[in-house]
Amino acid sequence: MRMYDLIMKKKNNGEHSKDEIRYIVDGFTKGQIPDYQMASWLMCVYFNGMTKAETIELTNAMADSGDRLDLSGINGIKVDKHSTGGVGDKTTFIVAPILASLGVPIAKMSGRGLGHTGGTIDKLEAIKGFNVAISEDEFINNVNNIKLSLVGQTGNLAPADKKIYALRDVTATVDSLPLIASSIMSKKLAAGADVIVLDVKCGSGAFMKDEVSANALARAMVDIGNGAGRKTYGIITDMNEPLGCKVGNALEIYEAIEVLKLKKLEDVDYGIYRLLEVSLTLASYMLMGAKNYDEKEASKNSDMLSYEQARKLCEEAITSGRALDKLAEFVKAQGGDAQMIYNPDKLPKARYIEPVYMEEEGYLSECKTSEVGMVSLILGGGRETKESKINLAVGIDIKKHLGDYVKKGDVFAYIHSDDKDVMDEAKARLLNAYKISDNKKEPEKIVKDIVY
């Protein structure tokens, strides 16, 4: 088998066999296939795509290139979620304790952020003492004992994906649907969960800018998951404005706690409503997936759980306080200060908190969500390089949302910063991220579609 022949085959829109894809992935990972040949093959994939079978085989080959997390020591059906990324996305801190409080094991590996905000691991480190580097034995024991553990991603999880992505990044082949889908799903398959729920973001702050593209990506990833024997759902959600009200590491932990403290789920701020709706939808499908994992057996015993039943159980996990208690239990189990969960005012605070005043009057009609993320980055809330140090205390607290009528002088948001010198730039960029119009435009539907 020669790489030259495989490049020619894909250039002519041929379909690779399983062995051919394994040859490509293994050869490149081991350094036997040079960058220039792999780059040529990736460009052929970019223009000609891959079949469903090829995409599944590519995903499995990348998942097999390193460690696969062995979760066999964990009792029950293991459930995981993945978000394709967004601004203000803190759903993990709401969804995971909901599921764990309902007895569903959550064994989750997450990464650090590179870009406008911190990753899940970074945000958790805003909690004093929290340890993201516990041993594999502790990880499994915690899931068996309290149903929830969350650790940093192992360095040898799907190494082929890491190496291929680095090449895609410098050869303009990132935005290829089969390559995106296989990249995400290779890590999810290697992480070992039985049920995977994917939060596929759509809009100005997402990789997929329109619903058609988001639906196509969700479909590809769901097909990969189901093809690998994992029960998989794709939830397409709106990212045409930040999710929730707060953007920034400690601020997002604070907001997640605010949601878990709710005793009534009606009449909440619109920003909280959006966050709550996405979180409850994800949690409900995760619960359904766990309870209906063996559909034939569940159907035979009349134990099939409907979405409505799952949603009610997830809502009650919040309003009863059980999910909040589970979050505190999880934090304590990993060395963190659980009192911060009951008293989030103890979380890190920025030195300066200043209001941002509206300079125009009218309806908030449009948001360049990625630009809001850039405001967080210039405040120090994200990483420009892997070596950058994140400031966990800084961020943005947004008080107005799309569809709201604003007047000149209204407080639009608060900027949390440790550096006075970047305040003016942050305020100006935040205001410029929003468009004001004379006519009210209804905001997008928050949950757009379900793919399964």
Image (tube, rainbow, N blue to C red):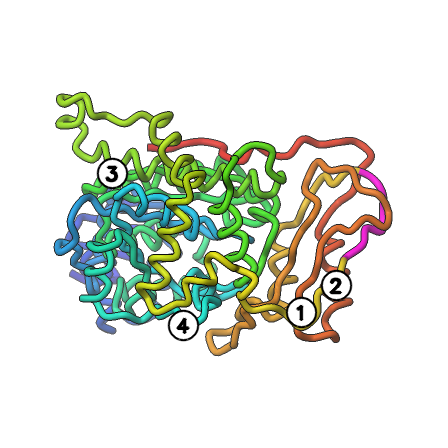
Quadrant the C terminus occupies: top left
Q: Are marks 1 and 3 in contact (CB under 8 Å)?
A: no
Residue corresponding to mark 1:
417
Which residue carries the number 3 mark?
Answer: 290
Where is 100 relative to 299, above or below? below
Q: Which residue is denoted by mark 2 in the rendering?
A: 354
Residue 187 included in the magenta stretch of the image? no
User: Mark 1 packing: few (<14 Cα in 10 Å), some, or many (20+)?
Assistant: many
Q: 321 above or below 343? A: above
Give the total of numbered labels: 4
Q: Say which label, 1 or 2, has the lower sequence index.
A: 2
- Taking 1 as reference, is 174 left or right? right
- The residue lying toward the viewer, choosing from 91 and 374, is 91
Measured as percent of width and height from the top left, residue 366 is found at 69, 42
Mark 2 and mark 4 in contact (Cβ < 8 Å)?
no
State the image coordinates of residue 238 (x, y, percent, origin top left).
54, 40
Q: Which residues are magenta?
A: 356-362
Task: Tell me the mark number nearer the camera, choosing from 1 and 4.
Answer: 4
Q: Earlier in the sequence, mark 4 or mark 3?
A: 4
State which tag comes first along the sequence, 1 or 3.
Answer: 3
Residue picked out by circle 4: 129
Q: Secondary structure at mark 2?
A: strand
